[in-house]
């Protein structure tokens, strides 16, 4: 049985993820650091020490083949893919072997721009439609993993 993990530090779709996990009767584990501590009914919470990438390392050590991971972090998504998990972002975009290299390159280029003093536009304000799209895509992912292929 697949588990849904949530990189819960700053994740805007925690409640939506828990709701879908309940619909599919899948365990849901929220992993957050002490600065973002949260507890929700219907999910187990794992709290880790504050520190760069602390949540990522705990999460990637727990994820197994076939698990779902909700994250905004491209680096974590790449590690989840390496373990044959299914990473998805807060907008419902699946991270895949086909798109992860391009995403990691874009992140690297953005870091170089910021390090040189450049500025980049931040994300648009989150909308109800963003949450609905995420829920639709997460349901589709759960259906493909749970429904056996013929």
Image (tube, rainbow, N blue to C red):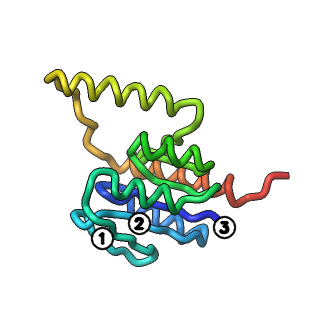
For residue 113, side relative to residue 150 (left or right): left
Residue positioned most to the left: 117
Look at mark 2 in the image and give the residue it sits on. Answer: 30
Q: Quarter holding the N terminus?
A: bottom right
Badge 1: residue crowd in 10 Å (few <14, some 14–19, many ≥20): some
Whole-percent x, y for residue 26 in the image? 58, 69
Badge 2: residue crowd in 10 Å (few <14, some 14–19, many ≥20): many
For residue 90, side relative to residue 38 (left or right): right
Q: Residue at x 23, y 22 (%)?
A: 113
Point out the tag, 3 or 1, that comes first from the N-terminus. Answer: 3
Task: Identify which residue, 13 or 58, lies in the foreground.
Answer: 58
Whole-percent x, y for residue 101 in the image? 50, 29
Look at mark 1 in the image and give the residue it sits on. Answer: 38
Q: Secondary structure at mark 3?
A: loop
Indicate the quadrant where residue 114 lies. Answer: top left
Task: Identify which residue, 52 or 109, lies in the foreground.
Answer: 52
Q: Residue at x 39, y 57 (%)?
A: 7
Q: Which mark is residue 46?
A: none
Q: Residue at x 23, y 34 (%)?
A: 122
Q: Residue at x 27, y 69 (%)?
A: 37
Q: CA distance from mark 2 to mark 3?
A: 17 Å
Point out the tag, 2 or 1, that comes first from the N-terminus. Answer: 2
Q: CA distance from mark 3 to mark 1?
A: 25 Å
Look at mark 3 in the image and give the residue it sits on. Answer: 1
Whole-percent x, y for residue 89 in the image? 44, 46
Kindly indicate whether the residue at mark 1 contacts the one at mark 2 (C-beta within 8 angstroms): yes
For residue 28, side relative to residue 12 (left or right): right
Badge 3: residue crowd in 10 Å (few <14, some 14–19, many ≥20): few
Kindly indicate whether the residue at mark 3 contacts the one at mark 2 (C-beta within 8 angstroms): no
Q: Is residue 130 above or below residue 13?
A: above
């Amino acid at each position: 049985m697949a588990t849904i993990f949530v990189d819960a530090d700053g994740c805007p779709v925690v409640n939506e993820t828990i709701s879908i996990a309940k619909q599919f009767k899948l365990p849901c584990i929220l992993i957050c650091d002490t600065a973002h501590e949260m507890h929700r009914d219907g999910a187990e919470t794992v709290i880790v020490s504050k520190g760069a990438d602390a949540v990522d390392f705990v999460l990637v050590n727990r994820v197994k083949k076939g698990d779902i991971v909700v994250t905004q972090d491209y680096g974590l998504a790449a590690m989840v893919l390496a373990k044959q998990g299914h990473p998805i972002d807060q907008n419902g975009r699946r991270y895949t072997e086909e798109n992860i290299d391009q995403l990691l390159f874009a992140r690297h280029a953005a870091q170089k721009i910021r390090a040189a003093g450049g500025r980049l536009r931040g994300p648009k304000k989150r909308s109800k439609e963003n949450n609905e799209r995420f829920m639709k895509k997460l349901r589709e992912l759960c259906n493909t993993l749970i429904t056996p292929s013929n």
